[in-house]
Image (cartoon, rainbow, N blue to C red):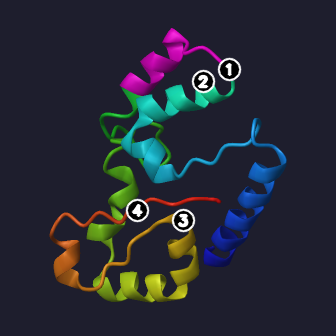
Amino acid sequence: MCRDMVADYYAAQLLLKKHPERFRVVRYEDLSLNPHEMTQELLDFYGLPMDPEVEEFLESHTKLDIGGVSSTYRDSKSAPFHWIKDLAFEEIDTIQNGCTKAMELWGYAKATNVTILSNKFDPILPYSLT
């Protein structure tokens, strides 16, 4: 998966250069943390209006976890970070060590120890495709 993320980054760079008016990249975490704002940005980018049904969907599907693993109802602000509590630091460290390049390219901070993870660790950093 990390190799795919690196390949996706370079593919996104090429697509952005070739089609700047038609291509847009959105990280999952950015959409999850700001679903309304990011949805509005995407719709604006593609010249589409914000439909009331989209607003209603975002309002009803991004606040609470309802249902099982395949449910579309999620607390979107916590969904991308469940790994912090679900994985042991040793697992996280192994993943980070194997994904260093992908993390650097896509703007993700490494957790250097278990204490950092327990202190409201924010792995989201700025990134640029240019």
Mark 1–mark 4 CB contact (< 8 Å): no
In the depicted view, which residue is nearer to us: 130 or 95?
A: 130
Mark 1–mark 3 CB contact (< 8 Å): no
Whole-angstrom CA distance, mark 1 to mark 4, is: 28 Å
Mark 1–mark 2 CB contact (< 8 Å): yes
Q: Please, is residue 61 above or below residue 16 in the view?
A: above
Whole-angstrom CA distance, mark 4 to mark 3, is: 8 Å
**Figure quadrant of residue 113:** bottom left
Q: Position of residue 58 (x, y in %)?
A: 43, 26
Mark 4–mark 3 CB contact (< 8 Å): no
Whole-angstrom CA distance, mark 3 to mark 2, is: 23 Å
Chain-order first, disc 4 or disc 3: 3
Secondary element at tag 3: helix
Q: Residue furthest top?
A: 52
Amino acid tagged 1: Gly
Amino acid tagged 4: Leu
Give the prevailing secondary structure in the magenta stretch.
helix
Span of residues in magenta: 47-59
Chain-order first, disc 1 or disc 3: 1
Which residue bears the numbered disc 2?
A: 44
Which residue bears the numbered disc 3?
A: 106
In the depicted view, which residue is nearer to us: 82 or 100?
A: 100
Whole-angstrom CA distance, mark 1 to mark 2, is: 5 Å
Report crowding for label 1: few under 14, some 14 to 19, many 20 or more residues within 10 A (C-alpha): few
- In the rendered structure, the answer to whether residue 105 lies left or right of residue 75 reads right
Whole-angstrom CA distance, mark 2 to mark 4, is: 24 Å
Which residue bears the numbered disc 1?
A: 47
Chain-order first, disc 1 or disc 4: 1
Which residue bears the numbered disc 4?
A: 125
Amino acid tagged 2: Asp
